[in-house]
Image (cartoon, rainbow, N blue to C red):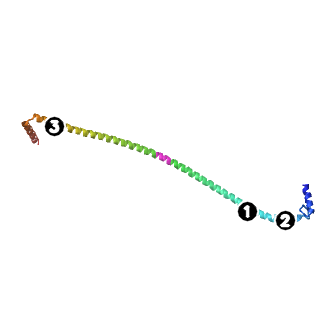
Amino acid sequence: MGNLVLLATEAHGEGGFGLNFNILETNLINLSILLGVLYYFGRQLVGNVLSERRSKIEQTIKEVEARQRQGAEALADQQQKLAQAQVEAENIRAAAEVNAKAAKEAILAASAQEIERMKESAVQDLNSERERAMAELRQRVATMAMAKVDSQLRETLDDSAQQQLIDRNIALLGGGS
């Protein structure tokens, strides 16, 4: 520090830059007047700037708090909607399970009825086929019997016996009327 003071005093003697410790020559009074004016007028200016800055900061904080409240409300609302959607999805899933179970039971019942109907139809077809076969068999047996009787009658009956048989049958038919 001593070197700095030495350099400052030597430079002042040569007309350069230096520190002058003479109070009257340094314009200490001018400096204090300047500081007083700056304090007097600057205080209002700085106070106004600071109060404006403070009001802007307060306004910004209020806006942020309002946005935060709105965001919290929106979040709560969306969470409530999500909960409702989950409940509704669960209800839909449960209803779908009930519908699927009912549809399964209906299909099983319809299948069982169709199987019964097919069994009954098969039994009826079998019975009708059996009756048709029996009727055809009876027809064949009757035809064969008639052919055999006819051939036996032709062999055993002569013309006069045939004529008597015919007359007797005509008499039976005529007498029965």
Residue 102 place in picture, x, y as percent: 44, 45
Residue lying at the far top in this picture: please name it: 156
Q: Is residue 83 magenta?
A: no
Give the distance between the C-alpha atoms of the residues marked 1 and 3, in whole angstroms. Answer: 136 Å
Q: Where's the N terminus, which quadrant? A: bottom right
Could you tell which of marks 3 and 2 lies nearer the N-terminus?
Answer: 2
Give the distance between the C-alpha atoms of the residues marked 2 and 1, in whole angstroms. Answer: 26 Å
Q: Is residue 96 magenta?
A: yes
Q: Quadrant of residue 50?
A: bottom right
Q: Nearer the viewer, mark 1 or mark 3?
A: 3
Tell me the kind of residue under disc 1.
Answer: Glu
Tell me the kind of residue under disc 3.
Answer: Ala
**Dot label at residue 52:** 1
Q: Determine crowd level at label 2: few under 14, some 14-19, many 20+ residues with C-alpha closer than 10 A.
A: few
Q: Secondary structure at mark 3?
A: helix
Numbered range of the magenta stretch: 92-98
Q: Quadrant of residue 23?
A: bottom right
Give the distance between the C-alpha atoms of the residues marked 3 and 2, in whole angstroms. Answer: 160 Å
Tell me the kind of residue under disc 2.
Answer: Leu
Q: Residue at x 13, y 36 (%)?
A: 151
Left or right position of 122 against 87: left
Residue lying at the far left in this picture: please name it: 160
Q: Secondary structure at mark 1?
A: helix
**Dot label at residue 147:** 3
**Which residue is tagged 2?**
34
